Image (spheres, grey):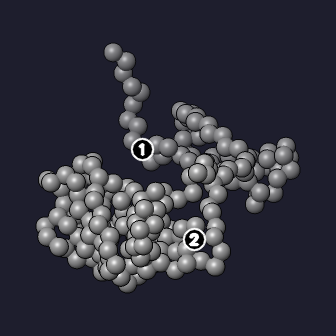
Amino acid sequence: MVLAGRATDTAVAAAYPLMKGMPAGPTWHAAKIVECGGQCTSNPRAGGVLATIDAGGFTIEPLDPTVACTPISVAAHMLYETANPFEMREPDGTLDVRDAQYAAVDDRTVRVEGSEFHVADQYTIKLEGARITGYETMSFSAIRDPLILADIDAWADLMRTMIRQRVSQTLGFADDEYAFDLRLYGHNAVWEADPVLL
């Protein structure tokens, strides 16, 4: 047994069918859907699903008898947590569902055929990490000065100029080495009179 950080969510569901000789395409596709439970059903909170894999594909149905899988709900699941809705990278290859066909078996069960798995030349693992890329500061201010509010756009342009100058003088950063955003909340809003305190 090897204990490691999470590399692939689908492997837990794919391992047993693959060990039993099921084809990789349907197995990895079914595992992708199964690991998210009821996300591919008419009620994602109703519980899990049951996938039955065979040599030609797989069927999938909800465990809750009041819930349904549809061809659209099952196909749409490839949009979830993937950069490409037709491909999903796994450590030993890529799931390809471009030619997958989704058909209703009955009013709550879906049959999927045509999923393929392309074995990679080299086994890889996805590493997730983080590093410091900089710091972020947010500041909120309120302005009631009628002179500033009379021409708030000109004041904002001056503020942007002053911030750039101060950053250049203090930190020595060029304009393309940092980013800042000045947003005028409430700009063009209606202000009729001073509020009345009760």
Is 73 displayed left or right of 152 in the figure? left
Which corner quadrant of the image does residue 91 belong to?
bottom right
Is 158 left, or right, of 63 in this rendering? right
Q: Which residue is mark 1?
A: 189
Amino acid on which disc 2 is placed: Asp
Which residue was labeled with disc 2?
A: 92
Q: Residues within 10 Å of mark 2 (few under 14, many from 20)?
A: some
Total marks in image: 2
Q: Nearer the viewer, residue 187 or 3?
A: 3
Closer-to-camera residue (48/78): 48
> Does 113 appear above or below 127?
below
Q: Which mark is residue 66?
A: none
- Quarter of the figure with the C terminus: top left
Q: Amino acid at mark 1?
A: Ala
Describe residue 156's horizontal placement relative to residue 90 as left or right: right
Element carrying mark 2: loop
Secondary structure at numbered mark 1: loop
